[in-house]
Image (cartoon, grey):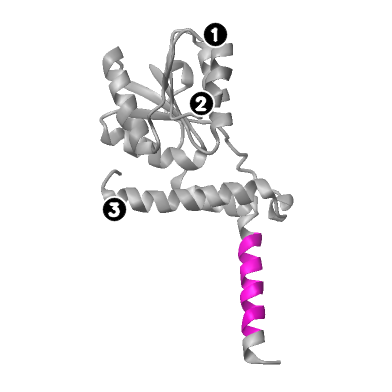
Amino acid sequence: MSKKFLNVKKLTLLFGFFLYLLSLKASYLLLLQPINTQPHTPASECKAIVVLGGRNDYDRVLKGLEISHLNRNILVVFSGVHPKYKVVVKHFDSPNVEFEDRSTSTYTNAKYTQKILEKKGIDGLCLISSEAHLFRAERVFEKFGLEADTIVSNEVSKKLKYSHFLPDLKYFNLNITLLYEYLAIVYYMYQRWI
């Protein structure tokens, strides 16, 4: 066999192993550990809730609706959430809901939300987003002078089982999202937004 064939075979095996690692819950938990945020206050004590749009809008929107249903006086801002969810939110008849439609990034989520909260005279808030996104989101909002507590929309059990070493497409997607977050954190640090 030629050396070129052996090198291709090794690269293929290495790439396959990398894909395997990306599909594990164990890998997700390991990658999440350095950027995991813990909620600071219960949702019932938040002055305002900001639901951040993104890849996992569905979980985030449901969490925002759940909180607005439990506390109808709290302001819930859906910032950068996909327009299709407006219809869903309007069906729940929550009295204190606002949509911020201009956001296309975490930076613009913070920028436009700050203006809404200033108009309402609200200075503290809770952010709803995925476990992976909250680390960066919390820091970006702080750059805009908004003290933000966190509420996880898609919390994953931290208990590890043997089955978590079997490939799972859900964790492949979550691990790709985590890798994106690490790249975004580096970018934001370079831009000095964090």
Element on which disc 2 rests:
loop
Q: Position of residue 42 (x, y in %)?
A: 47, 22
- Which one is in front, 48 or 81? 81
Give the CA separation, mark 1 to mark 3.
42 Å
Which numbered disc, 3 or 2, marks the residue closer to the eye?
2
Give the CA separation, mark 1 to mark 2.
17 Å
- Which one is in front, 87 or 173? 87
Tell me where residue 138 sits by quadrant: top left
* Mark 3 or mark 2, earlier in chain: 2
As drawn, 146 above or below 5 = above
Give the residue drawn at x 65%, y 54%.
23
Q: Is residue 51 visible?
A: yes
Highlighted magenta segment, given as a residue range:
6-20
* Mark 1 or mark 3, earlier in chain: 1
Quadrant in which the N terminus appears: bottom right
Tell me where residue 41 sits by quadrant: top left
As drawn, 182 above or below 91 = below
Left or right of 110 in this view: 10: right
Please identify the dominant SS of the magenta region: helix
Element on which disc 3 rests:
helix
Query: Circle 3 is placed at which residue position?
Result: 190
Left or right of 152 in this view: 105: left
* Mark 1 or mark 2, earlier in chain: 2
Give the CA separation, mark 3 to mark 2.
31 Å
Q: Which mark is residue 83?
A: 2
Q: Give amino acid for label 3.
A: Tyr
Q: Give amino acid for label 1.
A: Asp
Q: Is residue 14 within the magenta segment?
A: yes
Q: Give amino acid for label 2.
A: Pro
Local crowd at mark 1 within 10 Å, few (<14), some, or many (≥20)?
A: few
Which numbered disc, 1 or 2, marks the residue closer to the eye?
2
Query: Circle 1 is placed at which residue position?
Result: 93
